[in-house]
Amino acid sequence: MKKKIAVFSTGWCAEILTEFITGMQKELEGDNADIFLFLCFASPADSPASRVGELNIYNLPDLHDFDGAVIFGSGMDYSDRVDNILARCKEADIPVVIQGLKRDGISFVGADNYQAMKDLCEHVINKHDVKDIVFLGGSKDSLDSELRLSALKDYLREHNAENYLREDHHTNWENSEATRITNEICKSGKKLPDAFICGNDGLAMSVCVTLSENGYNVPEDVLVTGFDYIDVSRVFYPSIASVDQCSGEMGVSAVKMLRSLKKDPSQELNEKVSCKFIPGGSCSCFSHRNSDELRRILCRNTFSMRSETTYFNRKLNAVDSTILACTGYKDLKDSLHNLLKNNHDFEGESFHLILEPNFGLSIGDSTARFNTDKYSKTMDVIYSSENGILYEEETFASHKLIPGDSEDSSNHLYIFLPLHEGDSAYGYVAFRDMLPEFGNHFLQSYYERLNFSLEKFRYTLTLEHINRRLLDVMNRDPLTGVNNRMAYENKEAHLQSEINSESVAPFAIAMFDINSLKLINDSYGHEAGDEYLLRSCHLLCQVFKHSPVYRVGGDEFIAVLTGEDYANRDALEKHLNESMSPYSSTLPLPPDYISAACGIAVYDPSSDTNVSDVVNRADEAMYKDKAAKKGLIR
């Protein structure tokens, strides 16, 4: 049976995580094993609810179904989630390895950041005579960041140069924070430091850009160093002096550790992979790199990259427009399924879009609850294709992760990303064998755009549903349940617009006035009067059953007759009169007593310019009928 290894990480360290996964895949080549990467983009800058929604993806897998787990700790500053994963691994009795973080009793693989940072310090201080340093680190909870700062401080102390460190800052790995700090230093009027030493390459490049915007050049005016040696920092100008953590070697070691722990779970293994400091243009060492060659290759590939990006954006626009054009949940499921079935060039032959069952229910029920710390046992399959074979069922058991049969002889990488609004879980997407697309951030853009479109779709339809219900309440007479005066005024305005545009269909206005209501109210009470109105209204609706009936006053009703009722208006009026009681002004009244005056007027396009012209004639006819029924006229 195929082995399954779960990997948990955030996507903010995409470049080094890509190398790490590549190392794992290389070591697993001789095994029959798949990697399941549970990935999110939770950030300290997010709202607490949004972080919960992102991190919930870690709760998706049932670890009893796995043969081992790896926690890629670089950039994963959520101790409670790490502890939760470890507890579940222990309960499932599977081996687990942590990269970049340390926990007592848990096997660890990491990079020798400490010595590499010391090598970096020795280079900039001895070779470039740096004596004034600003350090920009990550977060206080990051082992990597704190280790790099400790190495810097220890090196300075060992060389009696503690005063070389002017400032150290925590940025929470946010490039915007590095920009803010650099701007403050530039605008303070104080002398620039000799060097900005940064906790990763992203922070270093942000510092370089901000310095340039303030009129300073790197490395002429100030040196800048980074960490991680990611691809973009190699072609950046100037190329960033950085540390290669050899993440691929860590991935190889993690798999070897899992094998060893499977044989002997009592072990606690620890391994540090050696890192290499690589000078670059940002510390004046231009001759140490082939950056110009890399830049030429990048320039040569610009056209194909642009074409690929253009196609990708078109796909995102197609997904977006398809979702937002849908008028209901079933329409959404059908439309998205057909879109992906007909065009899945980007997603490939194995792609899965899974939604929570309450996503659809929530459109008509604002009280529908979403999961925040798990996923439902049964999920809705919007689209699922594995090896080009479509999954035809509408639901599946979520603990399987992938609908259908995913077993084949090749090793695969599945990447799972969460769909959510705030802390409310909407579902997830799963990509297969798309590590390069993860590395170039296409997957992040895809799931974020999909997430936003689903959120907007649900919000729009929920709002429309609420508005329809509000309009129904606003337009409904609370006693009789028929339309009220506001609804009639809207109908009259619509008829008037059709008259104005000369596109109105034949219609007639029927007006009714319920007789004897005051007598019943005064004699039997208002409850009896309400019952009488309900009985009378029911008769009107029964006779003119193809026309909308409106209660426009206490005892006044209007019907707009079209179609069949319009054609049979005379017969219907006769039937109404035959169905009513003879008018009476004396008590007692029969228990089924109903009496109403009725007047009908037909729209005449040759003379009527307004709906009110027809209404006035119907009103006159109704009052004549009332007088006749009361015996006031023959």
Image: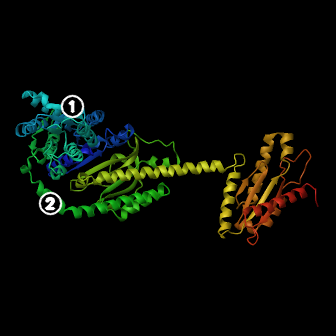
Tell me if 444 is positioned left or right of 262 in this view: right
Q: Between residue 385 and residue 214, name the one nearer to us.
A: 214
Badge 2 crowding class, 10 Å Cα cut-off, few under 14, some 14 to 19, many 20 or more, is few
- From the image, state whether disc 2 or disc 1 is nearer to you: 2
Q: Write down the residue under mark 2.
A: 296
Q: Is residue 591 above or below residue 578?
A: above
Going from the N terminus, do you reach mark 2 or mark 1 first?
A: 1
When asked about the image quadrant of residue 8, the answer is: top left
The answer to whether residue 353 is left or right of residue 115 is: right
Residue 280 disc label: none
Whole-percent x and y of residue 261? 16, 37
Q: Describe the element under mark 2 as helix, strand or loop.
A: helix
The local secondary structure at tag 1 comes to loop
Image quadrant where residue 278 sits: top left
Residue that extends furthest to the bottom in the rendered view of this protein:
606
Q: Is residue 345 visible?
A: no
Q: Residue type at mark 2: give it.
A: Arg
Q: Residues within 10 Å of mark 1 (few under 14, many from 20)?
A: few
Percent from the top left, x then y, of residue 307?
27, 64
Residue type at mark 1 is: Arg
* Residue with the most extreme front position: 189
Tell me: 549 left or right of 97. Answer: right
Q: Work out how far the residue at label 2 is from the one at label 1, CA to CA, in angstroms.
A: 44 Å
Observer able to see residue 162: yes
Task: State the residue position of label 1.
Answer: 103
Q: Residue 178 placed where, x, y %? A: 25, 40
The quadrant in which residue 519 appears is top right
In this view of the protein, which residue sits in the foreground, 79 or 506?
Answer: 506
Q: What is the x, y in percent for residue 522?
A: 85, 40
Image quarter of the C terminus: bottom right
